[in-house]
Image (spheres, rainbow, N blue to C red):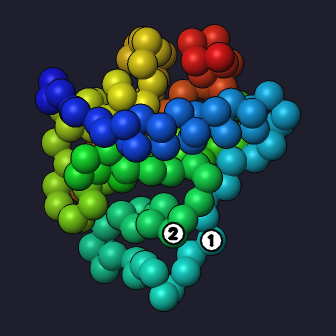
Amino acid sequence: MQLLNPSQQEQNRRDEVIATILECIKSNQTIYLPDFDPSISRPSDQYALTSVGIEPNPYGGTIGEYRYQFEGEEDLLHLIIVRLDGEVVEPSESQAVVSFLYPGVPTAMMWYKAGTVSHHFYLGHDVLLEYLS
């Protein structure tokens, strides 16, 4: 698996995003994708969800050359990982991002939907609360 070298700013953003998500889960608030802003992003003609989260929002951030975006309802949290340049993301790259975002959460607790330019991970809210609270 590829190792990432996050900056202090990237670590701080991750901590802020995860704290916001944990608070939403505890208070039973839905974690929404950001509203689409056509002045900032344009949907891909070829792939779905590659520009989701490019708009500033409390549930996403970047690490190195990757962007991550969370959304969730009821009891399942969805994590989307893409490259900032829109190029192919290898499974090992997405796993490195997940390890950065979910330190200590067993990968066996996640459902993984691999893609070409986006990778998707699903995790139960209760698991997140257990491991990251």
Quadrant for the N terminus in the image:
top left
Which residue lies at the image location 58% right of the left edge and 34% below the top edge? Answer: 18
Dividing the picture into quadrants, the one containing residue 23 is: top right
Looking at the image, which is closer to me, 13 or 74? 13
Q: Position of residue 127 (x, y in %)?
A: 60, 17
Quarter of the figure with the C terminus? top right
Dots 1, 2 in contact, CB < 8 A: yes
What residue is at 64 percent from the left and 43 percent from the top?
72
Name the amino acid, label 2.
Glu
The local crowd at label 1, few if under 14, some if 14 to 19, many if 20 or more residues have their Cα within 10 Å, is: few
Q: Nearer the viewer, residue 65 or 106?
A: 65
Q: Which mark is residue 35?
A: 1
| 98 lies above or below 43 | above
**Residue 93 located left or right of residue 126:** left
Q: Which residue is under mark 2? A: 55
Residue 55 in the image: state x and y as whole percent.
51, 69
| Amino acid tagged 1 | Asp
Q: Is residue 53 left or right of residue 117?
A: right
What residue do we see at 34% from left, 25% from top?
A: 99
Mark 2: secondary structure: loop
- Give me the disc on residue 13: none
Relative to 96, 68 lies left or right: right
Q: How many marks?
A: 2
How far apart, in angstroms, are the residues tagged by discs 1 and 2? 8 Å
Name the N-terminal-most of marks 1 and 2.
1
